Image (spheres, coloured by chain):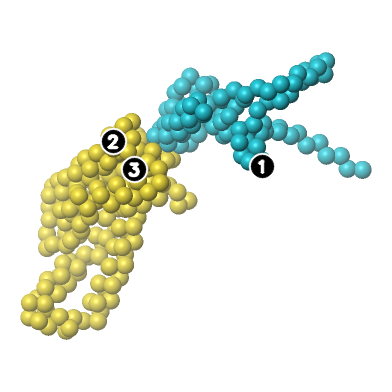
Amino acid sequence: MFQFNLKMNPKLPILCPSCESILQVAQLKCEHCNTSVGGNYALPIFLKLLQEEQDFMMQFFMNSGSLKEMAKQMGNSYPTIRNKLDDIIEKLNTLNQK
Amino acid sequence: MIKPLLHPFSIFSEKKLLFFGIVLTIFSAFLASFFNARRNGVLDVHFVTSISFTTALIESLINLFILSIFLFIAGIITNKKTRLIDIFITALVALPVFLLTFFFNINNTMSDLGLQISELNSNNSIMEILLDNIFLLLVFALWSLLVLAWVFILLYSGFKVASNAKGSKPIFFIYWCNTSS
């Protein structure tokens, strides 16, 4: 008998696979006592970003906002990193207006 | 492998690109004086009988500053956050690529051919041009087109990174900058 021990790290889906609208949270569950809370909660704005963009934001935060340091770590030039940040800021502004 | 050659601006830091660009500009001026190539226009290479290193360097610097100014204006129109150093580096790295055409003037081959063609043209006997010379002109024309394409790709990718321009904007601005300067 074969046993597969795949460690999956599922990504949080943020877009509806059917109509591509932004998904909302309908249920939250306590892992300790199995209590479930149902409702209709909007996703926090940072979770509406793509995983890649969230990782970028995390790295930006962990580097104390130093784009130069990030450019070194990511093997990209400074303006490339700054452009990515500008694109994310623009996306957050658009999401905020919605 | 090909990315550093076509899109160096998204990989290397500005310090490395600045150093590399300065070395390339000086080297291209040296080669221009060695092979008698004049660059008295941003998109211009022609061959003469002699040119000093100082003149070649001054011409390179004039081209560099004119192109940088036009690119910077285009960059500011596209994105107010555009930095002059990124634009300057784009021009600094892209323009010396023209040195790849200089080698055609070994022993004044191209400048002599140019004189010969203008002489034949003035005598209304252009059809007497030798087949070997036509072949050389064809190879030079094709090679020049490849070099020009490389310069445009470098200017495009550099401007795109420097100004975060999207869509067809960089193509339009690169065309505008090169035709204006």
- The chain identifier of the residue carrying mark 2 reads B
- The chain identifier of the residue carrying mark 1 reads A
**Relative to A67, does residue B99 appear above or below in the rendering?**
below
Q: Which chain is cyan?
A: A
Q: Which chain is yellow?
A: B
Which residue position is annotated with label 3?
A: B159
Q: Residue furthest right?
A: A1
Q: Residue at x 34, y 61 (%)?
A: B146
Which disc number belongs to residue B102? none
Q: Nearer the viewer, residue A89 or B93?
A: A89
3D distance between C-alphas at marks 3 and 2? 11 Å
Which percent across, then down, holds residue B14?
35, 35
Q: Nearer the viewer, residue A71 or A16?
A: A16
3D distance between C-alphas at marks 3 and 1? 38 Å
Q: Residue at x 82, y 18 (%)?
A: A34
Which percent across, then down, holds residue B169?
35, 46
**Can residue B19 be seen in the rendering of this structure?**
no
Q: Nearer the viewer, residue B54 or B143?
A: B143
Given this view, does label 3 or label 1 mark the residue nearer the observer? 1
Which disc number belongs to residue B76? 2
Q: Amino acid at mark 2?
A: Ile
Q: Is residue A64 left or right of residue B60?
A: right
